Amino acid sequence: MKPCVRIAALLPALLAVGAVSSILDMAPPIRGLVLADLRDTFEEVHNGHPHEAIDIMEPRGTPVLAVASGTVRKLFLSKPGGNTIYQFDERGTYCYYYAHLDGYATELREGARVEPGDVIGFVGSTGNADSRAPHLHFAIFELGPEKLWWKGKAVDPYPSLVAAVKRAK
Ligand SMILES: [Zn+2]
């Protein structure tokens, strides 16, 4: 047995005790996502800033799904990001960031619990996105000890997204 297979078999048990980070067990943020939909744009420069996120092009109104279980920490309307969601995982290790949303799921509130696959919002082009190119801007931040939603270290979501799509097949 290859070591990675052994770890994969242990993953559910490790997740149950919170010993594995949520980025290793992410669900796709869009239903039916395929590998061809993913392009690693983490290191690109967008509007003069490091992008540090992945853009997933989808029709306006496509449901956006929570990628991990945890808590909605902040719903924030920002100039560049438009309607955004900052979601913490169970342990507050990582913050998942969903931006340019057309809107939020009706019941979504700050402090709400979410499970992977829950609809939390809808793809749009709010903020600085081109209105002709609606997309989900998805980022992952590693939170510091102070757990501030606006202050985390960006992690490239691409490998985790690829793994999530493969698992969802
Ligand atoms: Zn983006």
Image (cartoon, grey):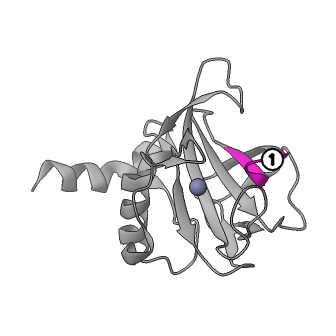
Which residue is located at x 59 percent, y 22 percent?
144
Location of residue 131 in the rendering, given as x and y in whole percent from the top left corner = 73, 72
Write the start and end of the magenta stretch as one range. Answer: 75-87
In the image: residue 34, left or right of residue 5: right
Q: Which residue is mark 1?
A: 79
Left or right relative to 24: residue 147 = right
As rendered, which of 99 and 143 lies closer to the eye? Answer: 99
Q: Is residue 69 above or below residue 162?
A: above
Q: Quadrant of residue 73?
A: top right
Q: Residues within 10 Å of mark 1 (few under 14, many from 20)?
A: few
Pinpoint residue 15: horizontal percent, then vertical percent. Answer: 47, 46
Decide whether the magenta segment is chiefly helix, strand or loop: strand
* Residue at the image position 58 percent from the left and 65 percent from the top: 29
Q: Can residue 12 be seen at all in this image of the molecule?
A: no
Q: Residue furthest top?
A: 145
> Regarding ligand 1, which quadrant of the image does it lie in?
bottom right
Depicted 161 relative to depicted 78: above or below: below
What percent of the width, then of the height, locates residue 114? 72, 56
Q: Is residue 137 visible?
A: yes
